[in-house]
Image (spheres, rainbow, N blue to C red):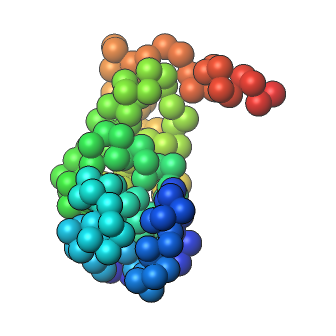
């Protein structure tokens, strides 16, 4: 798998220190087994699994830490778990868990994540899936249980204005 150098991780000071002590670069985290990361970082296996997932999901071209966190919030911890999934269903699940509808470009990211998990194509970016999403939504619409409130209507976004 191709190494990406701009991996971002939300790590504690101790986790960062343990990475430095063990000479592990963020971009190389996915070269370790989760159990080994747990031992090397002195963290519980569940935390090591999360750190691994954050790094692995950011190997997908044009995907950053926020979307990696979104995938984890849905219960995914590896690219293999995304194989054969449906990008439209992923965004629908994400919207239900967030309680709001989410910017349509995030659905493009969902579609890219599934495509990347299946094909490991480093040439595609999330915006390559915009036309596919638009066509799908024109033909299928959104589920009846889609949240009515938009992400930008949330209090945390209104306070930024």
Q: Position of residue 127 (x, y in %)?
A: 53, 54
Q: Nearer the viewer, residue 36 or 99?
A: 36
Quadrant in the picture for residue 13: bottom right
Q: Is residue 4 visible?
A: no
Front residue (pair 145, 73): 73
Counting every numbered tag in the picture gives 0
Of residue 67 and residue 40, the one placed in the foreground of this image is 40
Q: Is residue 120 above or below residue 151?
A: below
Which quarter shows the N terminus? Answer: bottom left
Residue in the foreground of this view, choosing between 151 and 116? 151
Measuring 36% from the left and 40% from the top, which residue is drawn there? 73
Q: Is residue 3 above or below residue 39?
A: below
Q: Residue at x 32, y 55 (%)?
A: 47
Side of 69 relative to 93 (left or right) = right
- Picture coordinates of residue 137 (x, y %)? 41, 32
What residue occupies the far right of the structure in this picture? 161
Which quadrant would residue 89 be assigned to in this image?
A: top left
Residue at image point 33% right, 20% down: 143
Q: Residue at x 48, y 43 (%)?
A: 106
Asked if residue 55 can be seen in this view, the reply is yes
At which x and y percent is residue 28?
40, 80
Q: Which quadrant holds the C terminus? A: top right
User: Does residue 106 appear to the left or right of 88 in the view shown?
Assistant: right
Q: State which quadrant residue 150 falls in.
A: top right
On the image, the x and y values in percent for residue 38 come to: 27, 66
């Amino acid at each position: 798998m191709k190494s990406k150098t701009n991996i971002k991780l939300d790590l504690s000071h101790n986790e960062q220190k343990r990475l430095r002590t063990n000479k592990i670069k963020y971009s190389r985290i996915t070269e370790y087994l989760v159990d080994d990361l747990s031992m090397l970082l002195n963290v519980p296996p569940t935390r090591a699994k999360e750190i691994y997932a954050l790094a692995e999901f950011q190997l997908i071209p044009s995907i950053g830490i926020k979307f990696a966190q979104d995938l984890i919030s849905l219960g995914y911890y590896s690219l293999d778990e995304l194989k054969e999934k449906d990008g439209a269903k992923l965004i629908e699940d994400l919207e239900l868990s967030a309680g709001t509808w989410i910017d349509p470009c995030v659905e493009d990211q969902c579609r890219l994540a599934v495509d990347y998990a299946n094909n490991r194509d480093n040439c595609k970016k999330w915006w390559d899936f915009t036309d596919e999403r638009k066509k799908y939504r024109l033909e299928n619409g959104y589920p009846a249980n889609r949240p009515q409130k938009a992400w930008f209507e949330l209090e945390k976004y209104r306070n930024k204005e």
